[in-house]
Image (spheres, rainbow, N blue to C red):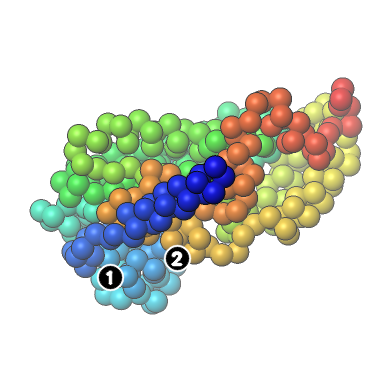
């Protein structure tokens, strides 16, 4: 019986591999718009798709990002300045793309731009801290998508939204997980809405990877700034050694956990854009596949126990 089940499983994965190996033709005629191309996943994806023959429109936040990307790319790649928090800037980028792609439309948009700070315990943050991140990670994704959606529909193309495993489970406080849960919800609703138009909407849910989002120095500096602004009453609740303990814990975990192979994520993005039959969701990273995603399906009491097991508690904790 076990051997029979094993054979069925092997046949299923063989069929899935064959089905997913088929790629779309005429890549040189297909335009792909990528946000957040200054560094990290976006930068690597822009260069990778350019080498694969796609016509890439890479949106960068800085002039330096645009200049550096042009130096290592072919003439097919075009850059555009984009601040996803500014509606006028989003509209201008969409107008530029409309003129660029013409009647063929836009094959794909990859909503990659995102930030990870400010991040900390919920009671360390203000509503403005939440708004600043939601403007980039959630509102920016929605604004960019809607600005080019008519062009995507014209090409019967793809929308690729970069969420996170932390759009499935919230192991830490602050707006990051909130924003990624929102991306997941937007992705799901858009996927259903776009079925009649032949548009595929795909979601990338990476685990921990070594990018600016997981840069320990950036996270440490953010925590120190938040701590400095806290009222003395809150500092007393957490204790004078709390911040040092958290920084030590973060340093230990981030030395072990983040994966340095960004191509694991970029390959999923490429597959979402180029496969005839892409997956609805991609979860690159072993931690995503074997820890975070399974943890998100567990009963809350078990998930909470595992997340709190090695947590650092405030000095005046009741636990």
Res. 70 in view? yes
Image quarter of residue 144: top left
Identify the disc placed on residue 214.
none
Where is residue 122? Give x, y as percent.
67, 30
- Name the residue rendered at 38%, 64% in the picture: 46
Where is residue 189? Give x, y as percent.
35, 30
- Name the residue rendered at 81%, 40% in the picture: 310
Where is residue 319? Give x, y as percent.
86, 25
Image quarter of residue 171: top right
Q: Is residue 116 left or right of residue 221?
A: left
Residue under circle 1?
53
Q: Residues within 10 Å of mark 1 (few under 14, many from 20)?
A: some
Location of residue 313 with respect to 137 vertically, above or below: above
Residue under circle 2?
44
Label 2 element class = helix
> Which of 279/181 is in front?
279
Q: Residues within 10 Å of mark 2 (few under 14, many from 20)?
A: some
């Amino acid at each position: 019986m076990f051997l029979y089940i094993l054979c069925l499983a092997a046949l299923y994965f063989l069929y899935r591999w064959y089905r997913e190996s088929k790629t779309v033709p005429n890549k040189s005629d297909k335009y792909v718009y990528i946000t957040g191309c200054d560094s990290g996943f976006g930068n690597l994806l822009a260069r990778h798709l350019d080498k694969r023959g796609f016509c890439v429109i890479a949106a960068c936040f800085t002039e330096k990002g645009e200049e550096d990307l042009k130096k290592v790319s072919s003439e097919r790649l075009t850059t555009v300045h984009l601040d996803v928090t500014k509606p006028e800037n989003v509209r201008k980028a969409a107008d530029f793309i409309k003129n660029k792609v013409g009647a063929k439309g836009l094959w794909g948009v990859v909503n990659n731009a995102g930030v990870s700070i400010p991040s900390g315990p919920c009671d360390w943050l203000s509503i403005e801290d939440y708004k600043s991140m939601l403007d980039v990670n959630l509102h920016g994704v929605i604004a960019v998508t809607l600005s080019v959606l008519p062009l995507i529909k014209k090409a019967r193309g793809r929308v690729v939204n970069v969420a996170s495993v932390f759009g499935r489970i919230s192991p830490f406080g602050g707006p990051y997980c909130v924003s990624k849960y929102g991306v997941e919800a937007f992705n799901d609703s858009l996927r259903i809405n776009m079925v009649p138009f032949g548009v595929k909407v795909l979601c990338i849910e990476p685990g921990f990877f070594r990018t600016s989002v997981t840069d320990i120095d950036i996270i440490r500096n953010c925590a120190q700034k938040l701590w400095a602004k806290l009222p003395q009453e809150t500092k007393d609740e957490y204790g004078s050694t709390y911040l040092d303990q958290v920084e030590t814990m973060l340093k230990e975990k981030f030395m072990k956990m983040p994966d340095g192979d960004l191509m694991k994520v970029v390959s999923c993005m490429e597959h979402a854009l180029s496969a005839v039959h892409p997956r609805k969701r991609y979860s690159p990273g072993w931690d995503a596949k074997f820890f975070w995603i399974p943890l998100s399906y567990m009963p809350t009491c078990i998930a909470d126990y595992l997340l709190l097991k090695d947590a650092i508690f405030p000095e005046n904790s009741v636990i």
